[in-house]
Image (spheres, helix red, strand yellow):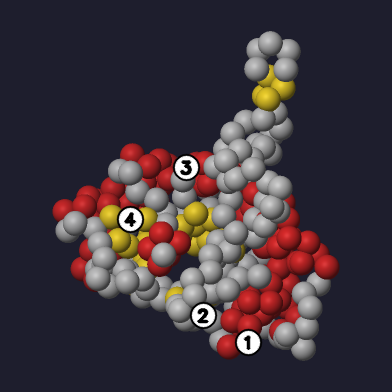
Amino acid sequence: MLRAAASAAAAGALVAGCDPHRDPGAVRSPGGPKSSGAGHATPVPVRAARPPTRVPGLPVQIEHGPRNGRAVALTFHGRGDPKMATALLREAERAGAKVTVLAIGDWLDEQPAMARRILDGGHELGNHTMHHRDICALPAAEAYAEITGCAARLNKLTGSIGSWFRPSQTRRATPLVTELARKAGYPHVLSYDLDSLDANDPGAAAVQRTVLDSVGPGSVVSLHLGHAGTVAALPPILDGLRRRGLRAVTTTELVT
């Protein structure tokens, strides 16, 4: 059953995300074309959304990148106040860092402009399920709907179902959820090897300490949007990485 053809809606989303006729250098803004001032409407060039990342030779479930490099991936579970999320992205951009945001579908329904804001900053966008339920405890049909529901939102907003899928309320996906993600169009499931514990709101100093005490080359760090302590912790985290000769890149850059 798991290897049966995907639903027409999910298949359509995947095909649209890989449209060979799409210009990868210029995607129209969701707000439509802007006037050039001469009476002509011209498309607004924005960064194209990436299709799901596929890396032959890597495991289906990825916890970290190469340990012999100088890069790390800061990955953010995507939900929360858009002003706080934007402030965090600005801090990353000020330091020349790129991050990966795994967005929750119902958050994208509430804050559709955030999808493009993330991509236009040079960051990476992925799927963190539709409603952030305990996906590994759900029946197969419900778990699949959680994955494809968010994928459809991403595709509508960006032209891609997102670079990565990360399961909700768990560090690692079960074999069933991994297979469902592959059926939905994601070759890999993105886990992590370092939990910042920022979702517990321990304060900026504690988040900074947790990350910098354990981070190393190839680390995939789990963080969250929507937490003031995380926003405050990000500049010293990025400074600490720089002092160690490490740089924050998108997860795709980390593993490829």
Tell me the SS state at disc 1: helix
Which residue occupies the extreme left position in the image?
A: 243
Of the residues under marks 1 and 4, which one precedes in the sequence?
1
Q: Residue at x 77, y 88 (%)?
A: 1
Closest to the camera, between mark 2 and mark 4, is 2
Q: Give the CA separation, mark 2 to mark 4.
A: 23 Å
Tell me the SS state at disc 3: loop
**Residue 248 has which mark?**
4
Neighbour tally class for label 4: few under 14, some 14-19, many 20 plus, Cα within 10 Å? many
Tell me the SS state at disc 2: loop
**Residue 60 has which mark?**
2
- Name the kind of residue labelled 1 in the image: Leu
Q: Give the CA separation, mark 1 to mark 4.
A: 31 Å
Tell me the SS state at disc 4: strand
Neighbour tally class for label 3: few under 14, some 14-19, many 20 plus, Cα within 10 Å? some
Of the residues under marks 3 and 4, which one precedes in the sequence?
3
**Residue 176 has which mark?**
1
Which residue has dot 3 on it? 121
Q: Residue at x 51, y 80 (%)?
A: 60
- Name the kind of residue labelled 4 in the image: Ala
Of the residues under marks 1 and 3, which one precedes in the sequence?
3
